[in-house]
Amino acid sequence: MEKKLSEAAKKVVLKMQQNELTESVIYEKIAQFAKGEENKQTLLRLAKEEKAHYHIWKSYTGVEMKPQKGKILKYTLIARLLGFTFAVKLMERGEENAQIEYNLLAKEVAESAQIRSEEEEHEKALLSMLDEESLQYVGSMVLGLNDALVELTGSLAGFAFALQNTKLIALSGLIVGVSATFSMASSEFLAARSEGRTDALKSCSYTGIAYLITVILLILPYLLLPSESFLAALFIMLAIVILIIAGFTYYTSVAQDQKFGHRFIEMASISIGVAVLSFVVGILAKKFLGIDL
């Protein structure tokens, strides 16, 4: 039986009802391909709770709804590409804003306090789901990413003025980058083995892959632009550095519940600072060594 609501409250309830139904379907779909039986069961439990919330809201509105196909497609695609933990935590972030709406509804909807409590339990349940392989090796990826950004950004910036030719810069950067990839991966392997870890090979693979992808992305502007456009390539490379740092920092901040701003500023400042210093070194080396290529 439909329960009486004010117009303002009904609009909020209709919005929540739609979200609960859609999110229950998203959880069910992600559970179908999430690895680990415990993860699957947690996702299915969340789906069941969201569906129960939908029926509570329906008792107030009397409206039968269909899930939002666009939102379902969006989050299932994110889950496949970036991992289910990132996808569901990104979706749950939207429910933080919903807490304000729950408070406004408290006077008209008695169940809103119960639903709010269950939503908070969702967060605790999700924290226990951080056992995806990709998240277990975030430290290895950060190591490879940080080292590649700092070392290669500095090298390419230094080469930019010293060589003043995009193709020579790309060649030099590629040699440095590939050599450093193997060096970093092997160092990670030896460090993991010395700690007695059985996942040394997997750990060094994540480090090496993160390093190599970064190398390719940073060298790309020098390969694509004309030989004389070394300064343009340098600025594009620095823009790519910022985008890589922003993207990876956002991913880890969502998946691991960390602050975005501080980590982003720290990583960006180090990489750009090293690039500026290396560019100055390149200018000085060319001037005092008297080498003209």
Image (cartoon, helix red, strand yellow):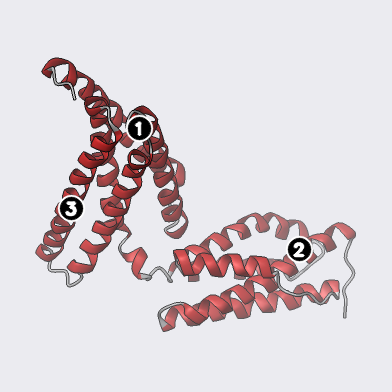
Q: Residue at x 42, y 58 (%)?
A: 256
Q: Amino acid at mark 3?
A: Met
- 235 or 72, nearer to the observer: 235
Q: Is residue 1 positioned above or below 210 on the image?
A: below
Instruction: Describe the element under mark 3 as helix, strand or loop.
Output: helix
Q: Residue at x 27, y 61 (%)?
A: 206
- 167 or 248, nearer to the observer: 167
Instruction: Describe the element under mark 1 as helix, strand or loop.
Output: helix
Q: Is residue 1 visible?
A: yes
- Residue identifier under label 1: 234
Other residues around mark 2 within 10 Å, as few (<14) / some (14–19) / many (≥20): few
Q: Amino acid at mark 2?
A: Lys
Give me the C-alpha separation between circle 2 and circle 3: 50 Å
Q: Residue at x 20, y 52 (%)?
A: 181
Residue 164 located left or right of residue 239:
left
- Residue identifier under label 3: 184
Quarter of the image that includes the C terminus: top left
Residue 194 located left or right of residue 133:
left
- Residue identifier under label 2: 15
Other residues around mark 3 within 10 Å, as few (<14) / some (14–19) / many (≥20): many
Mark before the other along the chain sequence, 3 or 1? 3
Percent of width and height locating residue 255: 44, 60
Give me the C-alpha separation between circle 2 and circle 1: 47 Å
Percent of width and height locating residue 17: 74, 69
